[in-house]
Amino acid sequence: MGTRPCKQRRARLTAGALLALQISLVAPASHAAAAADGPRSPAAVTAPGPAPAIRPAGVRTAATGTYDADVLATARSPYRQAAAPRTEAATRTEAKTGTEAQAGAKTRTATATQAGAKTRTEAKAGTEAGTTSRTEAAAKSSHPILPIRIGHVQAAQQLREAGLRWKSSGGCTNRSVRTCTSLEAVRAATVADVIALKRRSGCRVVVTGGTEVGHAPGRYSHHRGYKLDITPNDCINRYITREHAFDGVRGDGAALYRDSGTVYARESDHWDILFR
């Protein structure tokens, strides 16, 4: 009977010790929860936690795959943020400069190409113009413009209307008979020139030789309509010798007087006149 009170006392001491131990364990957890839920009291004291493990900068954690705070701070530093825009701007400037240089080179190349093409075109045009000119000159030399020719009746009418006469020793107009005086196929310009001679001189002009046979041949002959014979008289003799320059003596002894393209040859019984 004496041991039961001792056992009861021992049991109460053990229960008290367990309760104190439980209170000591629950108190820190309560303080931590209070610190997380609300503002910390000035009088509260937090027990120091375990020191974090030191890891090298830039090492990713295996659990989260994120970088340390110092690595992020370094990446976000003002120097890096300021240097990045400058690098990008420099890159854009270099790219723009390169593009402008390429555009300038392309423009110069295109200008040079156009200038060369223009020069070649002008040279080709000049060559073609020269070729055309030579071709036209050759065509003119090989195919000269034929003079306008008129018949005897038309020529005689023009002479008569201008106050000139024509006379035939044989009293005929047949071009194939040498004693006739024919104006058949005479140049219209020749008729106009002899009429002009009459008007300038104011003298009487009588045509005695035309395109009939019996005259000297040649390119600028009677037969081809370039020459006419007129009867000499004091008025026309004086006009020709005074108003035209003496140009020597022809092979047959006829004195020559020249006025531009017109040549006057004084033969024994007539003036042989070449109108060109």
Image (cartoon, rainbow, N blue to C red):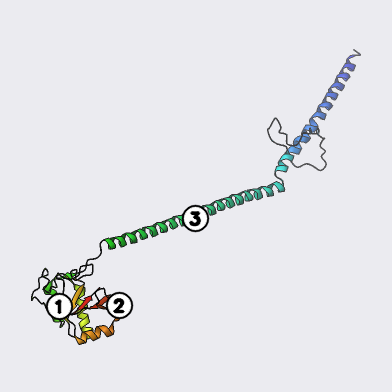
Mark sitting on residue 112: 3
Name the residue beneath numbered marker 2: 248
Find residue 130 and report its horizontal and vertical position in percent: 37, 60
Name the residue beneath numbered marker 1: 208
Q: Residues within 10 Å of mark 3 (few under 14, many from 20)?
A: few
Local SS, label 3: helix
Query: Which amino acid, by three-letter code, is at mark 1?
Result: Thr
Which residue appears farthest toward the right when viewing the image? Answer: 2
| Nearer to the camera, 9 or 203 | 203
* 113 on left or right of 161: right
* 54 on left or right of 126: right
**Location of the N terminus (image quadrant):** top right
Please identify the quarter of the rendering in which residue 185 is found: bottom left
* 50 on left or right of 180: right
Query: Could you give the CA–CA distance between mark 2 and mark 1, rounded to whole angstroms?
Result: 25 Å
Q: Are marks 3 and 2 in contact (CB under 8 Å)?
A: no
Q: Residues within 10 Å of mark 1 (few under 14, many from 20)?
A: many
Local SS, label 2: strand
* 3 on left or right of 30: right
Query: Which amino acid, by three-letter code, is at mark 2?
Result: Gly
Query: Could you give the CA–CA distance between mark 3 and mark 2, rounded to whole angstroms?
Result: 64 Å
Q: Are marks 3 and 1 in contact (CB under 8 Å)?
A: no
| Nearer to the camera, 71 or 250 | 250
* Residue at x 58%, y 51% (from the top left corner): 96
Please identify the quarter of the rendering in which residue 54 is found: top right
* Residue at x 73%, y 43% (from the top left corner): 74
Find residue 165 and report its horizontal and vertical position in percent: 13, 81
- In the image, residue 11 sits, relative to residue 42, either above or below, namely above
Please identify the quarter of the rendering in which residue 75 is found: top right
